[in-house]
Amino acid sequence: MSASLGNTAMATSIKGEMVQPKLRDVPAVRMEAVYKHYGEFTALNEIDLKVAKGEKIVVCGPSGSGKSTLIRCINHIEKHDEGLIYVNGTELDRQQKNIDAVRRDTGMVFQSFNLFPHMTTLENCILAPMTVSGMTKEEARDLAMHFLTKVRIPDQAEKFPGQLSGGQQQRVAIARALCMRPKIMLFDEPTSALDPEMVKEVLETMKKLAEEGMTMLCVTHEMGFAREVADRIVFMNEGKIVEQSAPEEFFNYPKSERARTFLDQIIH
Amino acid sequence: MSHFSPTAAVNYFFNYFLMKGVLVTIGLTIAAVIGGLILGMGIALMRMSSNPVLSGAARFYTWFFRGTPLLIQLVVIYSGLPQLGIKFSVITCALVGLILNEAAYLAEIVRSGFMAVSAGQREAAWALSLSPWVTFRRITLPQAFRLMIPPLGNSINSLLKATSLASVISVEELMRRSDMLMQEHFQILEVYAAATAYYLILTSVWDAIQRRLEKHFGRSSASKSKRAAARVPVAQASVEARA
């Protein structure tokens, strides 16, 4: 079994130093002047963002600032109204084949886990590899057990999601996403629905993934995680990216007033 | 005559003529459930469609068939339609009426089942690039079906008894045959006691089947996921709640 956590091409991470990604490669994600409206409400207001391969981005900001909408647009779970989004060079236009290609390149982890409650852990993990990637049951099973071992719950393979703790469910959700061998992982507040004592096990799993070079975009309020793992913090307010900088800079010298008040409120 | 004869009632219960009526009742019920589910599923899908013509037509259908008595529908199909040159056999009339009526109720049950499957389930399926068919077949349908069983059971119980209305258009099911026996022998209580016993037996058998179905399809849901199923649709409804 040679499966590893994601692409190892950029295993030597560039934590901290790098604010603007180098463009020697096609960026993992490129957003240009992206808008998203819900009726009168502007959820995304002229978003420009480039994410290099292997980069780890933490998106933060007050609630309603558009963080979740931003990352949900990247795999087209939310449809942007205007602007351009490219994922690994594939444009997210309205063509289904492009949408499919982008979704195969990205894995997503949700706040509410969204495991399939009527399937066991293992069945959750093998469904997509079997029906989308065309693997046999044995191949899919080996792959799933590999990733379930990575997230340290191989012994829960035959259990149903309802029988697992929140932390275990979220780790299953991560393993399920990894089974599709994504190049980019999107995390939408992965620890917000968890009891405090379960946050750590999920963050540890995500750190391990980051160390292995996965490109990651993560919406989170876990500032310790952001400080430790992120190459760049993207701070949003009212649908706009207000500032983006390396964690050191963002936490110690926030440029905008809004970011200062935000940090005051969440760091006690 | 001013007494009730239990022996006569038992005799009616084992009356061959009446038993054949029971078989017709069972047959009508099963056929109407199957036909109603197929049609109802189609109507539910139309109702959930984003096409306003389709959803409008489905809405009209349920409004019409749930808003008028089954008895009128049966009589119109049986005695009204021939006036327009449309003629069916008696049994076909009963089936058409029962299926059309049942489909309107089942469509609402099917629809509510699908709506109760959380948006997050579909999003997870999209994120995994599952095809629409796999998403329907493996994710949405099984979860919706589990939620549909209790109201479905209720509806089928009603239908079983509603087949007695077909007696009015002279279908010889249990009710009609009871009437015929009664008119022949004038042992009203005895005949209807036998018929009542049959209806109770049929509904009890269905209750038992329904319990087994619930158990079978609920086997994966520990108390936790049931709570989740109840909570999620509300929690994810509002747009402002996320972002």
Image (cartoon, grey):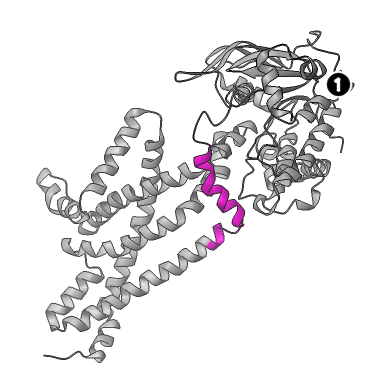
Q: Viewer-proximal residue, B158 or B29?
A: B158
Q: Residue at x 67, y 52 (%)?
A: A160
Picture coordinates of residue A165, whole percent (x, y)? 71, 50
The amino acid type found where label 1 is placed reads Ala
Magenta stretch: residue A146 in it?
A: no
Picture coordinates of residue A146, whole percent (x, y)? 82, 42
Picture coordinates of residue A24, whole percent (x, y)? 81, 8
Q: Is residue A136 visible?
A: no
Say which residue label 1 marks: A9
Q: Residue at x 71, y 35 (%)?
A: A177
Magenta stretch: residue B219 in it?
A: yes
Quadrant occupied by the N terminus of chain A: top right
Predominant SS along the magenta part: helix
Q: Is residue B86 left or right of residue A154?
A: left
**Magenta extent:** B215-237
Where residue A77 sits, quadrant-wise, is top right
Q: Residue at x 79, y 18 (%)?
A: A53
Against A62, residue B184 (above or below) is below
